[in-house]
Image (spheres, grey):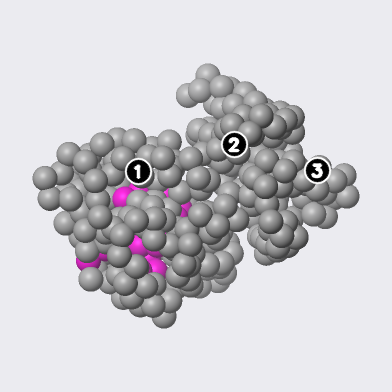
């Protein structure tokens, strides 16, 4: 099977390195410089004291024609619009697309796609890109995938093949899968980004933990969660499992990049507005992160 991966950030490099063990992988990068670096050095995957090198083909995104059996889109949510526009311009549409974005703001964008088989996923691995071709695995979690629209048989067989070398789980229902990850992201990402702490500190520091509890209560009310204790347990488990990791939002701000706050908190705030519910804590975090982004823009 031929697999294309659009995006060579931490997740794109991680997936390319692992999936190349069972598939023919091509990585599509934002710059020709990164493509050349990957073609020369391979993708270096660091995990603990282990180092592996995976040889994959790398091309700039301008060369992508959507001809692979599956294309995985591993870019930030705010980078999706030009990719979706390009897909819709293809005469021969890609066969199968798997989108790996945080939050749920991208679901409305996916509805615009004229593609039969659309899949979505949520990634729980901790990864850090160290240079153009090197990625460090900080925490091995899993990737959950589900059908957004189309044929489940292809995704199920793909998941089974990948699971032999890289943790991946097929889920029957995409909305609940993404909602669980959304809640974890909405709680962990903005708090760690503002407080500038590792994930584990949120449950270790009793004062931050109180903030954590209050935020979860507000999210529970807005999203009308049934069995909130299950969602709470999952968030706590993720915090503990990734205790030594920096959240993606904190890393984005440290690197002076835009964050995915609109895809994460923005989605929940829209739900609050739609239901005419108050969301003071979420609004405060949203504006704090947007303010940080404004400073990032000034520094660019």
Rendered position, 23 above or below 58: below
Q: Residue furthest top?
A: 298
Distance from disc 3 to disc 1, alpha carbons, whole Å, reads 34 Å
Give the residue at x 55% y 57%.
176
Distance from disc 2 to disc 3, alpha carbons, whole Å, reads 18 Å
Give the residue at x 65% y 45%.
223
Indicate the position of residue 268 as horizontal and vertical percent values: 60, 38
Rendered position, 226 above or below 165: above
Circles 2, 1 touching at the beta carbon (< 8 Å)? no
Query: In the drawing, does residue 66 fall left or right of residue 227?
Result: left
Residue 214 tag number: 3
Q: Is residue 1 magenta?
A: no
Indicate the position of residue 202 as horizontal and vertical percent values: 77, 50
Residue 237, quarter of the rendered image: bottom right
Q: Residues within 10 Å of mark 2 (few under 14, many from 20)?
A: some
Rendered position, 39 above or below 171: above
Q: Residues within 10 Å of mark 3 (few under 14, many from 20)?
A: few
Q: Quadrant of the N terminus?
A: bottom left
Of callouts 2 and 3, the N-terminal one = 3
Q: Which residue is mark 2?
A: 271
Using the rendered image of the protein, determine whether residue 102 is visible from the camera's viewpoint: yes
Residue 111 tag number: 1
Indicate the position of residue 171 as horizontal and vertical percent values: 48, 67
Residue nearest the observer in this picture, 108 or 261: 108
Q: Which residues are magenta?
A: 2-21
Distance from disc 2 to disc 1, alpha carbons, whole Å, reads 18 Å
Rendered position, 83 above or below 118: above
């Amino acid at each position: 099977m031929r697999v294309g991966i659009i995006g060579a950030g931490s997740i794109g490099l991680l997936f390319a390195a692992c999936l190349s063990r069972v598939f023919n992988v091509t990585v599509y990068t934002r710059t020709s410089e990164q493509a050349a670096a990957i073609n020369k050095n391979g993708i270096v995957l660091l995990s603990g004291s282990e180092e592996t090198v995976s040889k994959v083909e790398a091309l700039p995104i301008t060369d992508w024609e959507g001809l692979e059996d599956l294309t995985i889109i591993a870019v930030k949510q705010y980078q999706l619009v030009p990719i979706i526009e390009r897909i819709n311009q293809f005469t021969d549409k890609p066969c199968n697309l798997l989108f790996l974005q945080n939050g749920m703001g991208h679901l409305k964008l996916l509805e615009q796609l004229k593609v039969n088989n659309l899949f979505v996923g949520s990634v729980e691995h901790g990864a850090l890109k160290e240079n153009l071709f090197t990625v460090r695995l900080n925490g091995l979690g899993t990737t959950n995938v589900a059908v957004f629209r189309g044929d489940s048989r292809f995704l199920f067989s793909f998941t089974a093949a990948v699971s032999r070398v890289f943790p991946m789980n097929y889920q029957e229902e995409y909305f609940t899968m993404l909602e669980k990850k959304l809640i974890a992201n909405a709680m962990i990402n903005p708090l760690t980004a503002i407080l500038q702490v590792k994930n584990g500190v949120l449950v270790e520091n009793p004062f931050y933990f109180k903030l954590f509890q209050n935020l979860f209560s507000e999210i529970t009310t807005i999203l009308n969660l049934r069995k909130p204790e299950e969602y709470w347990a999952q968030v706590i488990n993720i915090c503990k499992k990734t205790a030594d990791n920096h959240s993606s939002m904190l890393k984005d701000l440290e690197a002076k990049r835009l964050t995915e706050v609109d895809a994460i908190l923005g989605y929940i705030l829209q739900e609050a507005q739609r239901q005419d519910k108050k969301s003071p804590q979420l609004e405060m975090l949203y504006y704090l992160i947007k303010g940080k982004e404004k400073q990032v823009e000034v520094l660019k």
